[in-house]
Image (spheres, rainbow, N blue to C red):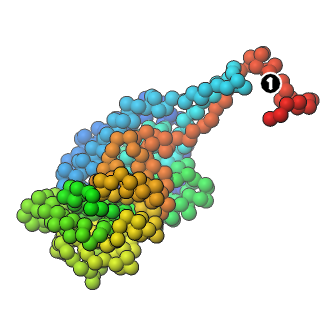
Amino acid sequence: PHIPRAKLDHASVVDLDSGSGGLVERTRSVFRSGRTLPASFRRQQLQNLMRMLDDEQETLLKCLHEDLRKSKHESLVSEIFIVKHQIKKHLSNLGKWMKPEKVPRTLENFFDDLYIYKEPYGVVLVIGAWNYPILVLLAPVVGAIAAGNCVIIKPSELAQATSHALETLLPKYLDNECYPVFTGGPEKTSELLKERFDYIFYTGSSQVGKLIHQAASRYLTPTTLELGGKSPVYVDASANLQLAAKRLFWGKIQNSGQVCIAPDYVLCTKDVQIKLLGYIEKAMKEFFQGTIKNSPDFGRIINQRHFERLTQLLKNQNIAIGGHIDADERFISPTVLIDVQPGDRIMQEEIFGPLLPIVNVSGEDDAIEFINSREKPLALYVFTNNSGTKKKFLERTSSGGVTINDTIMHLVAEGLPFGGVGQSGMGAYKDRASFDTFVHKKSVLSRSYNILGEKIESVKYPPYKEFNTKF
Ligand code: NAD
């Protein structure tokens, strides 16, 4: 489905030569015209986006396959359906969420109205990453549109096919003056970031997240940073180890491990490790039956640079399971490593691939100390049947989110906002939290001219009288 660049001439994709300053200014003047404010307009645009996902589903599936060899199942369940669900949720709750929130009156404001007014920020920049090039781009866009903003939409250039498709398709469905698509790599994006935005929503690495934050600080622009990190897994002997292995392995093979909340490494005792390895092997056979390489359900590494980075991480490691590589296809089989040392290179960076190192610890206190000696992760996974252990991990570690006795699933669970903490990000979105992210909550006091109220308050005017009461 490679869409030739020439075809884009007629699409309303931003002409980079006209300068990103012009783009932001134009978009701001559209915002100031008030076009995005009526609920009916927001609804219409969300419905258009839904129509795009319906009409163009086949094209998008082909693009995800071309970029990541993502299976149809994964592409639907973990990208397209989630965005559609977000659209539905925003559509059905829009009236309720937009409504000013009444604040109860107190005696002092007995005759007045107090409320929290949901004001769109203005021009929002949404920057997406390549691993879920539809989900992490469009899910925040849904919230930003629903909240009444104009949005400059910036897909990741590394998911080439999907990015090209989106830059052609989005302008056909969305109001292009309110929601222009901006394309380009780091250089052009750095230029764009010199402009003044009213909100920046970024998904990608912590490294680039710092650059975004720095650029945003020039105008004190509020930002949400959805970043990554090394998400640890702790497994103890009380867990259902067969299910733990299956759920852990499933979490690691999604998108070939290229998931921001993929289980990055396992902490467990040697005894637990022996059993886990057996069960992981069993799960692998169950999932892929024949050879993994021929399975339509297992993806590929996004590009050569990441493929080489991952194969370097395997160097000098003790491979317990897997370790098969095919450079022509950028294929790396799910691989479990044992005897991994905390100082090894694989333990220094987010893996973002199908490699699973196991580091042995003596128990839960040792594991907690290990986790706390590192940056705060985006996710934490604890497999245990022991309620004391669950409580201890929740109380004594910090992470963006937690799933107990599974992996990834807190991202999907209805009603739970999703986001990081510390180096794994700031802010959270999904469901109502998406809408809330993109509105400024303006406190409003609307006073009455009631004579009695004015009389009670007359003490506020000079000439002041002595206070004869204690505060
Ligand atoms: P990427 O290379 O696609 O970069 C993300 C975006 O940043 C792209 O749109 C890119 O054009 C832009 N960019 C890159 N360098 C830039 C620069 N110097 N200045 C301005 N913009 C720049 O994606 P990535 O960063 O490799 O993505 C993988 C990371 O994203 C992982 O760390 C992963 O954990 C994280 N991630 C987080 C989430 C989340 O929701 N928290 C979701 C997906 C991915």
Q: Is residue 409 left or right of residue 399?
A: left
Quarter of the image where one finds residue 112: top right
Residue 323 in percent (x, y) is at: 19, 75
Residue 159, compared with residue 358, is above or below; it is above
Q: Quadrant of the C terminus?
A: top right
Q: Which residue is located at x 19 percent, y 75 percent?
A: 320
Label 1 sits on what residue type?
Glu
Residue 83, compared with residue 88, is above or below; it is below
Tell me if mark 1 has few (under 14), some (14-19) or many (20+) residues whose alpha carbon lies within 10 angstroms of its own: few
Local SS, label 1: helix
Quarter of the image where one finds residue 214: bottom right
Q: Which residue is located at x 91 percent, y 31 percent?
A: 466
Quarter of the image where one finds residue 350: bottom left
The residue wearing badge 1 is 457
Q: Is residue 343 left or right of residue 147?
A: left
Q: Which residue is located at x 13 percent, y 62 percent?
A: 282
Choose between 409 and 54: the one closer to the eye: 409
Residue 169 in percent (x, y) is at: 31, 47
Q: Report the residue that reaches farthest toward the top.
A: 451
Residue 21 in percent (x, y) is at: 54, 55
Residue 14, compared with residue 85, is above or below; it is below
Residue 168 in percent (x, y) is at: 32, 50
